[in-house]
Amino acid sequence: TGADMLTGTWRLNVAKSKYSPGPAPQSNTIKIESVEGGLKLVGDGVDSQGRKTHNLYTAKFDGSDYPTNAMLDAKPNPNAADTVSWKRIDDYTYEVTNKLKGKTLTVARHAISKDGKTRTVTTTGTNAQGQKVNNTTVFEKQ
């Protein structure tokens, strides 16, 4: 099923990814587990300035907003989305809306390759600073 394509450990391939505005993070690893009707996500990485990032949430594939817990160096990240909503388009495609204080920041389209080894995320919108975001990030299943 679709959630099975999504579950697992995904490592960001920084070299294959494009960030606008940059700079790109140094690393990011995302673990996705299947839960009833949705997923549990844990992300750990290092941002462009060497700060540790941590993101944790559970969301259903119902388009509802679910709270996220985004941390920067073990403190709440004021510039990160505080809610996320997931919609399943098909087994290989998901749409994720990130909001801050009820306002949509970005929409991310997740496309999983047919072999299940690559997940390409196209993110558009604006960040918390109001800058236009147009990112293409490539994750490889570990």
Image (spheres, grey):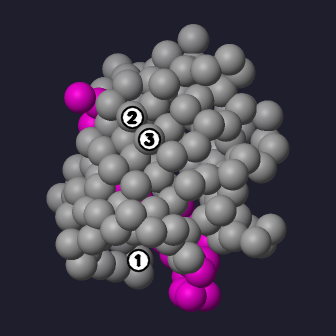
* Residue 133 painted magenta: yes
Q: Secondary structure at mark 1?
A: loop
Q: Nearer the viewer, residue 27 or 141?
A: 27
Q: Nearer the viewer, residue 44 or 108?
A: 44
Q: Is residue 130 visible?
A: yes
Residue 56 % position (x, y): 51, 46
Check the picture and name the quadrant holding the C terminus: top left
Relative to residue 15, is residue 63 drawn left or right? right
Label 1 is placed on what type of residue? Ser
Q: Earlier in the sequence, mark 3 or mark 2?
A: 2
What residue is disc 1 on? 20
Relative to residue 115, is residue 106 drawn left or right? right
What residue is disc 2 on? 31
Residue drawn at x 69%, y 57% is 83
Residue drawn at x 56%, y 76% is 78
What are the residue bounds of the magenta stretch?
A: 123-142
Residue 26 % position (x, y): 21, 64
Q: Earlier in the sequence, mark 1 or mark 3?
A: 1
